[in-house]
Image: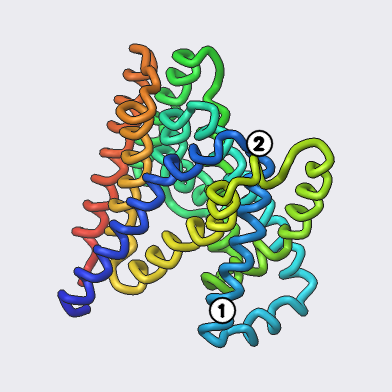
């Protein structure tokens, strides 16, 4: 890989994780709308955005080849429901002043994926990773003590996306083709939900042009970082992407504390310190593995 390609890949990676880290600001602008309504819009407009991208790339034939397989359609519904759960937890937490809490979920996500990889995919866990998972577990318990209950939104986003990632790897799915089938499979549920809700609340918020346009943009906002991530994955090693991914929860954490003025008590601060130690051990184990890998 040429240095210029690597620099481009790093730039795409930083952009992807920066966008993911700054998304709470976008979702906060829709805080007057119920999370279920926002998530339904997100699923529908993500499907529309992906369809436009696939049509432009002339890849629709790949979608047609896959949707005729019943087993794939069933797995796509399951994967789509996991995505919807992840998005719903994230939007709910953001719009209920729990941005700091949900950032915890994305810090522990890679560690949770290690655990699932061990039990489901029979992947190995080295001693450092076991230590990191143990420390992170203590951190999550302490976070629960600090909040007065378990950090359900953090566990929700981490568990749903970790399970999604493991099944994605197991199925050996490609990127946008499988994603449009997943979002398309659950888009009808989103439409039905909006039709049901329209009798009680306006599914377009207050109906102002700003809110309507923002809701229409939920698809583009969802897909843009995914596009950047895909381009980064083509150009740089996964180990480097693994390190860059912590830009997102760090951005969410800083936004929660500095921009949204969410309060942290001492127990929560200790909890995050333990999580950051666990993440540091995890990153060290990844770096050591990379350095010791034979050329």
Secondary structure at badge 1 equals helix
Query: CA separation, marks 1 and 2?
Result: 30 Å
Compared across the picture, whether 85 is left or right of 236 comes to right
Secondary structure at badge 2 equals loop
Q: Position of residue 92 (x, y in %)?
A: 58, 35
* Of the pair 37 and 270, the residue shown nearer to us: 37
The residue drawn where x is 67% and y is 69% is 181
How many labels were placed on the picture? 2
Q: Position of residue 239 (x, y in %)?
A: 30, 58
Q: Which mark is residue 34?
A: 2
Q: Position of residue 109 (x, y in %)?
A: 45, 43
Name, please, the residue furthest toward the front: 208
* Of the pair 64 and 241, the residue shown nearer to us: 64
Mark yes or no: residue 180 visible.
yes
Name, please, the residue furthest toward the left: 3
The residue drawn where x is 27% and y is 68% is 9
Q: Quadrant of residue 206?
A: top right
Which class describes the residues within 10 Å of circle 1: few (<14), some (14-19), or many (20+)? some
Q: Which mark is residue 20?
A: none
- In the image, residue 148 sits, relative to residue 3, either above or below, namely above
Mark yes or no: residue 131 visible.
no
Sequence-wise first label, 1 or 2: 2
Compared across the picture, whether 171 is left or right of 251 comes to right
Which class describes the residues within 10 Å of circle 2: few (<14), some (14-19), or many (20+)? some
Q: Which mark is residue 54?
A: 1
Compared across the picture, whether 26 is left or right of 182 comes to left
The residue drawn where x is 24% and y is 59% is 290
* Of the pair 122 and 134, the residue shown nearer to us: 134
Could you tell me which quadrant the N terminus lies in? bottom left
Q: Position of residue 234 (x, y in %)?
A: 35, 73
Q: Quadrant of residue 172?
A: bottom right
């Amino acid at each position: 890989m040429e240095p210029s390609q690597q620099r481009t890949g790093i730039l795409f990676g930083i952009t992807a994780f920066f966008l993911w880290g700054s998304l709470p600001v976008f979702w906060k602008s829709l805080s007057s709308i119920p999370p279920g309504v926002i998530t339904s819009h997100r699923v529908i407009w993500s499907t529309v955005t992906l369809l436009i991208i696939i049509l432009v790339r002339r890849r629709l034939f790949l979608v047609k080849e896959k949707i005729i397989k019943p087993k794939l359609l069933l797995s796509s519904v399951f994967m789509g429901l996991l995505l919807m759960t992840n998005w719903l937890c994230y939007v709910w937490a953001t719009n209920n002043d729990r941005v700091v809490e949900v950032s915890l979920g994305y810090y522990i996500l890679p560690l949770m994926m290690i655990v699932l990889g061990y039990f489901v995919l029979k992947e190995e866990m080295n001693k450092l990773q076991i230590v990191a998972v143990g420390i992170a577990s203590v951190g999550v318990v302490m976070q629960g003590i600090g909040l007065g209950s378990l950090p359900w939104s953090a566990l929700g986003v981490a568990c749903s996306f970790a399970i999604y990632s493991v099944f994605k790897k197991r199925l050996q799915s490609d990127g946008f083709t499988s994603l449009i089938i997943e979002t398309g499979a659950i888009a009808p549920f989103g439409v039905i939900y909006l039709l049901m809700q329209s009798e009680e609340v306006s599914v377009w918020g207050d109906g102002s042009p700003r809110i309507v346009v923002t809701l229409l943009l939920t698809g583009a906002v969802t897909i843009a970082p995914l596009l950047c991530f895909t381009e980064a994955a083509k150009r740089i090693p996964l180990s480097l992407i693994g390190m860059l991914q912590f830009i997102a929860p760090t951005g969410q954490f800083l936004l929660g504390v500095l921009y949204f003025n969410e309060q942290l008590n001492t127990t929560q601060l200790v909890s995050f310190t333990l999580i950051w130690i666990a993440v540091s051990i995890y990153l060290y184990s990844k770096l050591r593995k990379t350095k010791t890998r034979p050329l």
